[in-house]
Image (cartoon, grey):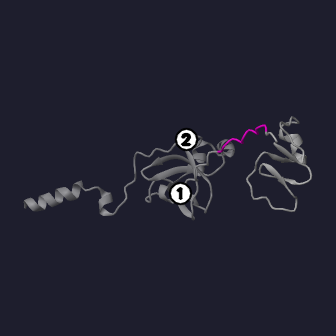
Amino acid sequence: MKAWALFLGIFLLTPSFALGQETKPDSCVSVDVKAPTQWIGSPPRNVNIRIGPGIDYPVHESGELFTGEEIQILQECHGWLQARSMPEHLIDRVIEQRGESQAQEMLLFWVRKDLIRRPAKPSTVMPAPVPQRRTCCRICRRGKACGNSCIARNLTCHQPRGCACNGEDSATATGGELCRAMQI
């Protein structure tokens, strides 16, 4: 009898998700349709969207997100993301035409977090290097610059860029001021 009571007590205390049923999260409160975006994402394949954060909620009237469609994430709750896909500049127009409650229903939806990918963080854009004043050690008028010297125009240069300048670039190399320029 004690074993049966223990089994019944454990059964009653076991959360429903342990028995294969998903519970509706009750702490996921819908945010305002005009809430600021936390981040942007997109699905790698077509995925269903729902009116609430769980598979127990019906599919949203829009049906699904298409591959690569950009969405704006508003919040995360229990492995689900609340999002909108309409550009922000059109939201006010929808609210004006349909009212706040209908706009909430139309614009906001929930999607499983694992079905949405964040775009890679943009690489740090390095500022363009400030052009430094270049001093020409040689000005190549008949040949071409190759490293720190001049070579014939029909030859291939195998040296890294040096201080030699071609005749046409020498005027811009230092803004017209050439130091130690040797004419070759």
Residue type for callout 2: Asp
Q: Main secondary structure of the magenta part?
A: loop
Asked if residue 161 lies in the magenta stretch, the reply is no
Residue drawn at x 46%, y 44% as measured from the top left: 29
- Residue 31 has which mark? none
Residue drawn at x 17%, y 59% as measured from the top left: 8
- Extreme-right residue of the structure: 142
Q: Earlier in the sequence, mark 2 or mark 1?
A: 2
What is the C-alpha distance between the residues marked 2 and 1?
21 Å
In the rendered structure, the answer to whether residue 21 lies left or right of residue 105 reads left
Q: Residues within 10 Å of mark 1 (few under 14, many from 20)?
A: many
Highlighted range, magenta: 125-133
Above/below status of 136 relative to 47: above
Residue drawn at x 30%, y 60% as measured from the top left: 18
Residues tagged 2 and 1 counted as in contact (Cβ below 8 A) = no
Look at mark 2 in the image and give the residue it sits on: 32
Question: Where in the figure is residue 23, as x and y percent of width and height?
Answer: 37, 55
